[in-house]
Image (cartoon, grey):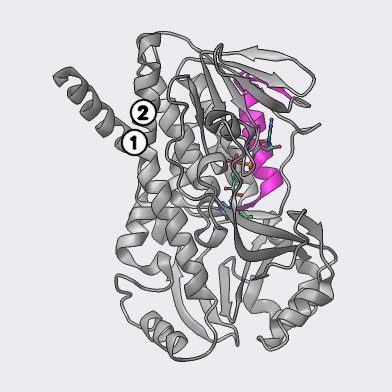
Amino acid sequence: MVPKSSISLQFVVVGGGIGGLSVSIGLVLSGHKVTVLEKAQELSEVGAGIQIPPNSTRILEQLGCKTEILEHALVPKAYHFCNHKGDNLISLELDPYCASKYGCKSLHIHRGDFHKCLVQRARELNITILVNSEIVDIDLDHNIAITHDGRKYQADVIIGADGLNSNVRNSIFGRNTSPTNSGDQAYRSLISIPEMNKHPELDFIHKVPCVNFFWGPKGHVVTYPLKGGNTCNVVVMAPDNLPPDSSVVAADKKEVLHFLETWDPRLQLLLSLATSTFKWRLQYIEELNCWSHPAQNVTLLGDACHATLPYLAQGAAQAIEDAAALAYLFGKIKDKSEIRFILKTYERIRKPRTTRIVNSSKECQQIYHLQDGEKQKLRDLKCAMDPPQEGCPARWADPEFQEYLFGYNIFEECHKQWVLSKTMKEKL
Ligand SMILES: Cc1cc2nc3c(=O)[nH]c(=O)nc-3n(C[C@H](O)[C@H](O)[C@H](O)COP(=O)(O)OP(=O)(O)OC[C@H]3O[C@@H](n4cnc5c(N)ncnc54)[C@H](O)[C@@H]3O)c2cc1C
């Protein structure tokens, strides 16, 4: 639960993406005022589908967004992990398993729909969202965010939720801080399921809503249905061949088909039905020394401080957990003099978890993209263990890691850490 603060602070949130909107909603619920500054001309979310794991659904319920999201989302029955020839390595039930074990469902949704649900909730709470407001600098002496056209927004706390190439991060560190290239890119396509219906050999991909993985040499493929089962989200990870100065460009379908030449022919058929494909460079952020400015009330959230490879489908989920942590902790504030203490507590709670997830996602790149050979055989043997054991290559099936990802309750964690921090502070 989000507690309600006895004082009301003014926040500026830079970036109206999934993380920025989630923290704005949470902070208003905890009694504060928020202005969101978004650089785009209109509020929208680019890309295709997104998975919302149970650790995230739990929070979205508390933010008051769950009902709306459920109207647009699908509930996957299972994860299926196959090799690149289409042979099943391991499957993991998701529904009703997640609801009965973790109290929350795993979902998938179109990003645009997800974003709209958050915007709608923000509007219900009268949050000010200003588009065409790119923040180019932060005046750290006065806690002021400065837009490209010279507008100034002063706040008690500024939160940089401005994504991978965060300007707020550059301001905090006083230098340009670039993300790291992973060596992979993602081809993203949305494919019409009525078109797929003309090919019964593709039924296995979409007849039952599931997340399908195909692991192969130098890449992997992920598919899941969206939009009430009318569209199939298909992502193909492959070696990065984007021009150095671009992070997303339209892709020639022939390129994807060439990459999949030796894979399960049904994947070739599937991708041949794509009407448009974009490719995205996949980057991540190496662990930062800190997330907040050492002396001023400016901090970071989401991709701005821990962008991760999408291989555990946890990037947005971690941004939403950050949002919930800030909402909880600022719900406890009694005096402005506690802001620095809260920002330190936020970082202490969030950094170890997000670092483990970024590093584990990088490890997945090694696990999923093995060439055929001894290491691949060993991987496949480990997948075949029934029941799955700790270290299972399909990371969600590893019982310890699954509990770590899905069982995490950020509100309980914040409560525990808040009590601990207060006790430690009183002892000092
Ligand atoms: C192929 C792929 C698949 C993925 N799948 C999943 C998944 O299934 N599940 C999951 O949880 N995550 C997934 N992710 C990760 C997820 O998309 C991101 O982690 C998430 O969108 C980060 O949200 P954010 O709000 O921190 O940043 P962003 O979504 O990048 O939002 C940043 C916002 O800030 C704005 N902005 C940027 N600079 C400025 C500025 N200077 N001033 C003002 N505004 C600014 C931008 O316009 C944008 O609106 C995936 C990522 C990729 C690439």
Q: Position of residue 69 (x, y in %)?
A: 59, 42
- Image position, residue 268 (x, y; %): 74, 81
Q: For this view, does 114 lie left or right of residue 29?
A: right
Q: Is residue 316 above or below residue 216?
A: above
- Outermost residue, front side: 175
For label 2, the residue is 344
Q: Main secondary structure of the magenta part?
A: helix
- Kind of element beneath mark 2: helix
Quarter of the picture holding the C terminus: top left
Query: The N terminus appears in which quarter of the rendering?
Result: top left
Ligand 1 picture quarter: top right
Residue range (magenta): 108-130
Q: Which residue is mark 1?
A: 348
Question: Residue at 66% of width from left, 24% of height from top?
Answer: 137
Image marks 1 and 2: residues in contact by CB distance under 8 Å: yes
Q: Amino acid at mark 2?
A: Lys
User: Is ligand 1 less than 8 Å from the beta carbon at label 2?
Assistant: no
Q: Is 127 included in the stretch rendered in magenta? A: yes
| Figure check: 85 above or below 394 | below
Tag 1's secondary structure?
helix
Q: Name which residue type carries label 1.
A: Arg
Residue 424 vertical placement versus 390 (above, below): above
Residue 401 visible, this orientation: yes
333 falls in the magenta region? no
